[in-house]
Structure formats: C-alpha cells, structure tokens
Amino acid sequence: MSEHLDAFAARLAALQTEGSLRLSVLGSEARRRLQPLLHTGVLQVKKSGRGQRLEVVDQETLARFIQSQYPEGVTAPRPTTRADAVHRLRSAKRGGNLSQYRGMFVRVLQPHALDTPGLDGNTLHDITTAAGAVAVVLGREPECACRGTVVTVENEDFFHQAEALIPEADLLIYTAGRMSARLIEWLSRQQGMEQVIHAGDYDPVGIQEYLRLKKAIAHRVQLFMPADLETLFAHHSDPAILRRESNQRAMSLVRANLDPAAQKVAALIDRYGAGLEQEVLLTH
C-alpha cells in the first residue's frame, strides 16, 4: 500500500474516511490550508470532550478540494522528480528538493583543486583566471571531484575576494545563502579534500550552515573567524538581523550545540544582541 504523499494528505484522508479529526493534530500550515473549507462551511469546528474536533459537513466538496490539491490521489507514490511533483501535488516545490541537477558557481584558485569530466584542474583554473569564476553541475555522471582546502562562501562580494583573507583556499564555492543538501552530500564524499572552511554571516542562520557541514564532514570542517571578530561585533553588528524569523528559529539550535566555534559566535550574538554580516571583513 502506498504511503500518503505528505502529512497534509494524511489529514485529508482521515477527514474523508472518518468524517472528523481532532483539531489538536493539525499544525499551523494545515490549518491555514483548510481555511477556505472552514469559511464556506464544508468543515466545522465542534467541541469534543475537553478539546475540539474538525467535522466534515460536505463530503462531496471535500472530495473536490482533495482532488484539486492531489490530482492523482493522496496515496499516490511519492514524487521522485520535480515533474512528478507537478503531476501529483500541482507544485514542483511541494515535492521538496527533487532536482536532479545542482549548479555550482566556483572559483578554482589552484590547478589541482577541481576536475570535471573532460576538463582538468589546469583548464578550470585558467578559466577562473580569465573569466573570474566558472560554473559546474552536480548530478552528472561521472561527477566532478575536488581536492585541497575548500571554502564555502555565503555572500557573493566576499566570494570574489575571499583569497585575500583566506590565502590557504584552493577552491571557493558560492552558496548564495543556505547550502543545498546535494552540495553538502557531494562534499562529504570528496576523498581528496583536506578541509572545508565555512565563511558566512555571523548570525544564527550562518552558524547553522556551518553546523550542517560539521555534522556531515566532522573534523574536516572549521568556521572562518578573524582574530578581531569581537571588535567587529562591537562596531558593526546589526540588531535588525536577529529580528528576521529565520534567525529567531535558528538561534535556539545554535545555543544548544556544543561546538566551540558555534558557542563563541553565539556568545557574541547574545552579548551584543545583534548579528554581523560577513561583508564587513572586506572593509577593514
């Protein structure tokens, strides 16, 4: 028997087969998506003991709603590609990270740092020197391989100048914010890679990205922290950064992690009540 496509599909299936559902089992996103049915009276909230239940008033309209959300049914096989997700969920994004390929924008600073099928590191180094950067694609077979010291960089300005502050870098990878799971998985399989240095913003999300790498690659990962990081926090950190919802969610996870580098940055964030963007490193 096929599993439900996702948690919301399972809730809809329960409403359809049982006619009701405890309201407490619905998360905020599921409640948001059910609002049209509540507004039109297809569903009603009723008291049930000490709690509340969601009861179906109009099964026919509920069935049409389910079909509009899941064209091939709530128990169709889970999508394995973005095309499948459009067919089964009406949305490529709702299927999760199903892309077969992932573009990677890099700067090859040393000839030995990256090889791709049909091109050796010397060629990619020459292209980087001539054009400033090069793009490769993860997901192709045979795949590319990297060696030496790899630096993952969150922001593009720093990506184009990082070797001035991290001279040991052999390969720079631009992550454009959060890293894809495909990139982290690819890095974890690189036998010739000596270490990864993560250079990102000094805020909860930036540290969370470092911890994602550390979990996958362990002792080969370090966080780039300049010696004057506290001085930079004192003069240039921004409290508005911590008001971003993504940083608020990430902060509790960062505080709970025992990694020494994460703890040091978390202490600075708490001390100054602010985060620090990595571009400040280019101005001092």
Image (cartoon, grey):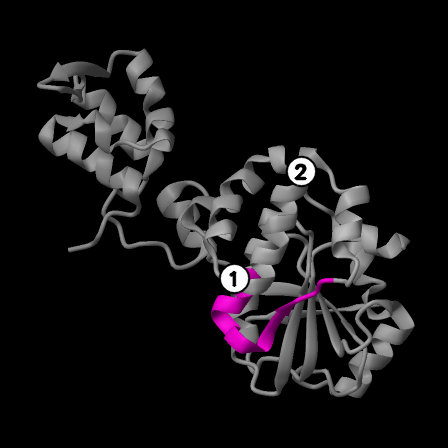
Residue appearing at x 89%, y 52% in the figure: 283
The answer to whether residue 72 of the structure is visible from this angle is: yes
Badge number at residue 188:
none
Percent x, y of residue 143:
58, 80
Label 2, on which residue? 241
N-term-proximal mark, 2 vs 1: 1
Residue appearing at x 52%, y 46% in the figure: 250
Label 1, on which residue? 212
Residue type (three-letter) at the residue carrying disc 2: Ile
Q: Is residue 216 left or right of residue 226?
A: left
Q: Give the range drawn in magenta.
A: 210-225
How far is mark 2 from mark 1, CA to CA? 21 Å
Looking at the magenta stretch, what is its main secondary structure?
Answer: helix
Percent x, y of residue 232:
79, 50
Residue type (three-letter) at the residue carrying disc 1: Arg
For the residues bearing labels 2 and 1, Cβ distance under 8 angstroms:
no
Residue appearing at x 25%, y 11% in the figure: 41
Q: In this view, does 189 lie to the left or right of 44?
A: right
